Image (spheres, rainbow, N blue to C red):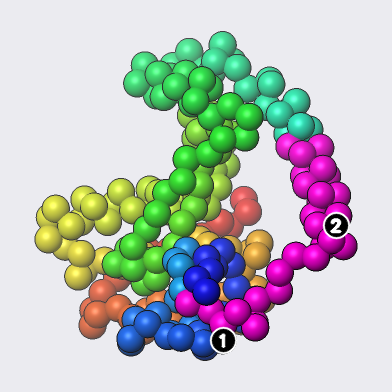
Amino acid sequence: MRVSILRSVVDSALLPFPIKDEILTVRDAIGTYVAWPKELIIFPTDKMATKSKTMKKRKMAEENDDDEEEEDLDIDSLPPTIPASLKMVCMWVKETLKNGKTIVCSFDEKIFGHPFKTFVTEKDVYNFATMNEVSGSCVSIYMSYLHGVLKKSKMVDMVGFVSPTDIGTIGCGSPIERSHAIADRMKKGKRGQIFFLPYNSSK
């Protein structure tokens, strides 16, 4: 059977069916579809389905709370000095990203050393427009843009990027694990290459 891997518990775990020399570990396969033994897949039972429904209801309640909080994010509340083009983006987002809809963004291996996907929410765009703290998704997208600029200038070999999804304080393991993630990324770099990575001093 083929399965889609969204996240990993043990990044270094080897895949049952590796793809040549490119996708060997579970971490490498995040965001892709890979072959998986049927006997190693846990299919949902009635009990699990009931639990899943309970979790879904809880998630919907949380989303409703978020929606209530985001009701204050109105176009009229944007700063008067905001560029017209950015205001138009906010207006488009307000109409398009309703009811929890998101924009999915995919990144190939050349940008961050491994392929993965992320998403942008309505709140991400509003935070960006109002110059509030942005999410790791926004940072990843900006890095992807910079990679495109460097590619046009034929400077990709000079600069590399480390994704915030690999070294963020939330969901990326202990400080030691995050340090290993940085080291692993640099091992894939070229001699003399400079790496850009996000850093939040909390100040």
- The amino acid type, in three-letter code, at marker 1 is Ala
Instruction: Find disc 2 in the rendering and name its residue.
Output: 51
> Which residues, given as a range, are shown in magenta?
35-63
Q: Is residue 99 left or right of residue 15?
A: right
Residue 178 location (% of width, % of height): 57, 75
Residue 152 on the magenta segment: no
Instruction: Find disc 1 in the rendering and name its residue.
Output: 13
Contact (Cβ within 8 Å) of mark 2 with mark 1:
no
**Which of the two residues, 107 or 86, is positioned nearer the viewer here?**
107
Whichever of labels 2 and 1 marks the residue nearer the N terminus, that label is 1
Residue 121 location (% of width, % of height): 55, 38
Question: Which quadrant of the figure has residue 75?
Answer: top right
**Which of the two residues, 198 or 46, is positioned nearer the viewer here?**
46
Q: CA distance from mark 2 to mark 1?
A: 28 Å
Front disc: 2 or 1: 2
Helix, strand, or loop for circle 2? helix
Q: Main secondary structure of the magenta part?
A: helix
Q: Residue at position x 85%, y 57% from top?
A: 51
- The amino acid type, in three-letter code, at marker 2 is Lys
Q: Residue at position x 51%, y 87% from top?
A: 16
Q: Residue at position x 56%, y 56% from top?
A: 200
Residue 55 on the magenta segment: yes
Residue 30 seen in the figure: no
Binning the other alpha carbons within 10 Å of mark 2 as few (below 14), some (14 to 19) or many (20 upward) gives few
Q: Determine whether 52 is above or below 123 in the image.
A: below
Residue 39 location (% of width, % of height): 65, 83
Helix, strand, or loop for circle 1? loop
Q: Is residue 169 left or right of residue 199?
A: right
Binning the other alpha carbons within 10 Å of mark 1 as few (below 14), some (14 to 19) or many (20 upward) gives few
Residue 71 seen in the figure: yes
Q: Residue at position x 34%, y 62% from top?
A: 108
